Image: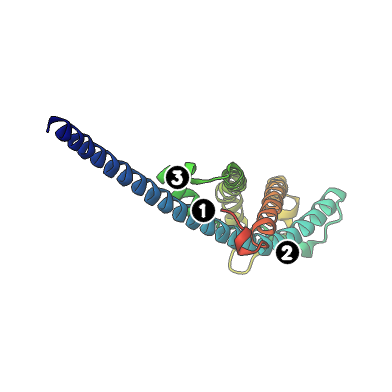
C-alpha cells in the first residue's frame, strides 16, 4: 500500500508539473503570437508613413527646387549689379512662402513610448526604422531653424518695408544690405533643407522598393 501511495503522489506531482508546463507553453505561444501581430502592425504603419512622407516630399521638393533656382539667379544678378527692379515682387513672393513637409511620425512615437524595439526581428528592420526616423529628425532640425529665422528676422524686416497684402515695396530695398543678407541666408537655409529632403527621399525610395514590391509572402516581418 505504501508503494502504491508513493506512486500516486509521484503521479499527482507529475500531473501538476505537466499542467504548469503546458500553461507556460500556451502563455508563451500567446505572447509570441500577440508580439508577432503587433510587430506586423507596426511595420505596416511604418510603411504607410514612409509612403505618405514620400508623397509630400516629392511635391514639396519640386516646388523648393524651382524656387531655389530662381533665388540663385536673383543672387547672381545682385552680385553683378544688374538685377532688374521688377524682380522685387518675385523675390518677395519667394521669401514669404515656406514650403515644409508635415512629417508623419506617429508610428515612431508609439514604438518609443511602448519600448517595443525588441519586437523587430530581424535586426535589419530595426536599423531601417531607426535610420529613417533619424533622417526625418535631421530634416526637421533644418525646418525648425529655417522657421525660427523666418519668424525672427525675415518677417519683422519685411513688415517694416513692404505691403504684405500686395507684396509691393520700394525698389530701393534691393540695395539694402540687410535685405540682401536676409535673402542670402534664406537661400542657404533652403538649400540645406533641400539636401536633407533629398537624403530622405533616397532612403524612402529604397525602403519602398525593397518592401512594397515584394509578394506578400516574402515581405518582412
Q: CA distance from mark 3 to mark 2?
A: 49 Å
Q: Nearer the viewer, residue 51 or 165?
A: 51
Tell me the SS state at disc 2: helix
Mark before the other along the chain sequence, 3 or 2: 2
Badge count: 3
Query: Which of these two is toward me, 198 or 178?
Result: 198
Disc 1 versus disc 3: nearer the observer: 3
- Give the number of the disc on residue 105: 1
Q: Which residue sits at x=80%, y=51%?
A: 75
Disc 3 vs disc 2: which is toward the camera?
A: 3
Residue ID for mark 2: 90
Picture quarter containing residue 61?
A: bottom right
Residue shown at the point (51%, 58%) measured from the top left: 45
Counting residues from the start of the chain, the first of labels 2 and 1 encountered is 2
Q: Give me the residue at 27% from left, 44% from top.
A: 19
Q: Is 142 drawn above or below residue 158 in the view shown?
A: above
Frontmost residue, 178 versus 135? 135
Q: Position of residue 213 (x, y in %)?
A: 68, 62
Residue sitting at 52 percent across and 46 percent down?
120
Amino acid at each position: 500500500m505504501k508503494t502504491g501511495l508513493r506512486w500516486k503522489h509521484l503521479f499527482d506531482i507529475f500531473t501538476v508539473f505537466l499542467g504548469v508546463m503546458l500553461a507556460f507553453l500556451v502563455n508563451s505561444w500567446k505572447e509570441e503570437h500577440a508580439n508577432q501581430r503587433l510587430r506586423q502592425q507596426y511595420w505596416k504603419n511604418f510603411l504607410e508613413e514612409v509612403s505618405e512622407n514620400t508623397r509630400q516630399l516629392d511635391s514639396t521638393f519640386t516646388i523648393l527646387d524651382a524656387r531655389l533656382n530662381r533665388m540663385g539667379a536673383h543672387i547672381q544678378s545682385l552680385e553683378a549689379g544688374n538685377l532688374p527692379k521688377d524682380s522685387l515682387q518675385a523675390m518677395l513672393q519667394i521669401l514669404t512662402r515656406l514650403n515644409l513637409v508635415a512629417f508623419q511620425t506617429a508610428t515612431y512615437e508609439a514604438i518609443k513610448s511602448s519600448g517595443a524595439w525588441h519586437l523587430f526581428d530581424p535586426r535589419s528592420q530595426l536599423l531601417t526604422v531607426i535610420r529613417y526616423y533619424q533622417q526625418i529628425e535631421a530634416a526637421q532640425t533644418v525646418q525648425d531653424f529655417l522657421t525660427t529665422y523666418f519668424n525672427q528676422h525675415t518677417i519683422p524686416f519685411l513688415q517694416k518695408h513692404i505691403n504684405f497684402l500686395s507684396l509691393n515695396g520700394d525698389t530701393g530695398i534691393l540695395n539694402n544690405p540687410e535685405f540682401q543678407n536676409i535673402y542670402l541666408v534664406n537661400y542657404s537655409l533652403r538649400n540645406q533643407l533641400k539636401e536633407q529632403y533629398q537624403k530622405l527621399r533616397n532612403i524612402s525610395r529604397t525602403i519602398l522598393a525593397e518592401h512594397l514590391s515584394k509578394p506578400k509572402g516574402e515581405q518582412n516581418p
